[in-house]
Image: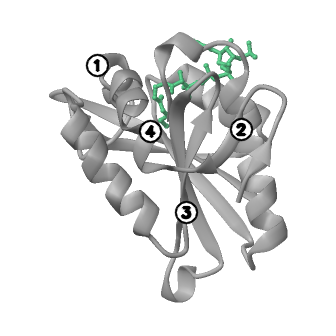
Amino acid sequence: MQLMLKKCTIRPWRLDDADSLARQANNRKVWLAVRDRFPHPYTIPDAHEFLQRAVTGQPVMKFCIETEAAGGGIGVHPGEDVYRHTATVGYWLGEEFWGRGVMTEAVTAVTNFCFENFPLRRISAEVFANNRASARVLEKAGFTFEARLKDNVIKAGELLDSLLYARTK
Ligand SMILES: CC(C)(COP(=O)(O)OP(=O)(O)OC[C@H]1O[C@@H](n2cnc3c(N)ncnc32)[C@H](O)[C@@H]1OP(=O)(O)O)[C@@H](O)C(=O)NCCC(=O)NCCS
């Protein structure tokens, strides 16, 4: 998949994205909004390890968001069994590219692409309740707020609610 958009290109990760990936991902503000399996600090070896997995994964469901260089990532995770018609989406962007509408464009395009090309009926995303910018991205990308999951997350020692958003076909 390659999506050439106005503000960014969504494309498969490449092994030579390591330097740019580590530079953008090595940011506590990014880490605070994502799962703990996202390393912090984020080193070049962490980037190599991620890229090895990303380029060999079949089907390729983890994508690079390219602005001037590899600027962030977006991944689609298909459900299984009775959830096989669903997927979840996760994403992050390097801080220097925030606030330009890049992620709104990326999430909209990737979810449109997934609905058009896979037999999916539902794509959901979960946002920590303190992340207004990400909730806003989902709203602008056509997702509906479904639920506040109380005390669902522990991040950086803090117990947080999370917000469940979904787009259905
Ligand atoms: C959240 C994130 C993806 C947003 O990406 P982005 O490209 O800056 O988002 P956009 O520019 O498309 O849209 C951001 C929207 O949030 C709004 N926003 C930003 N900060 C906000 C805040 N503190 N409170 C409320 N709204 C906020 C912006 O104004 C904009 O909405 P608008 O167009 O209506 O004005 C990016 O900041 C990021 O990667 N953060 C760290 C990782 C992360 O949060 N990942 C998502 C985990 S669920």
Give the percent coordinates (x, y) of residue 116.
84, 67
- With 110 as the anchor, is 78 left or right in this view? left
Provide the residue designation for mark 2: 9
- With 43 as the anchor, is 165 left or right in this view? right
Q: Is mark 4 within 8 Å of ligand 1?
A: no
Give the number of the mark in front: 2 or 1.
Answer: 2
Provide the residue designation for mark 4: 17
Amino acid type, mark 1: Arg
Query: Is 28 placed above or below 12 here?
Result: above
Amino acid type, mark 3: Met
Q: Which residue is pictured at 52% across the width and 11% down the height? A: 96
Q: Earlier in the sequence, mark 1 or mark 4?
A: 4
Quick check: marks 3 and 2 in contact, CB under 8 Å?
no
Q: Looking at the image, which is closer to me, 3 or 163?
A: 3
- The secondary element bearing badge 2 is classed as strand
Give the number of the mark in front: 1 or 4.
Answer: 4
Cα separation between marks 4 and 3: 16 Å
Query: Are there few (<14), some (14-19), or many (20+) residues within 10 Å of tag 4?
Result: some
Query: Residue 28: which numbered mark, if any?
Result: 1
Q: Does the image show residue 32?
A: no
Q: Earlier in the sequence, mark 4 or mark 3?
A: 4
Q: Does the image show residue 13?
A: yes
Amino acid type, mark 2: Thr
Q: Which residue is pictured at 51% across the width and 33% down the height? A: 72
Amino acid type, mark 4: Asp
The quarter of the image holding the C terminus is: bottom right
Q: Looking at the image, which is closer to me, 14 or 90?
A: 14
- The secondary element bearing badge 1 is classed as helix
Q: Is mark 2 within 8 Å of ligand 1?
A: no
Q: Earlier in the sequence, mark 3 or mark 2?
A: 2
Q: Earlier in the sequence, mark 2 or mark 1?
A: 2
Query: Are there few (<14), some (14-19), or many (20+) residues within 10 Å of tag 1?
Result: few
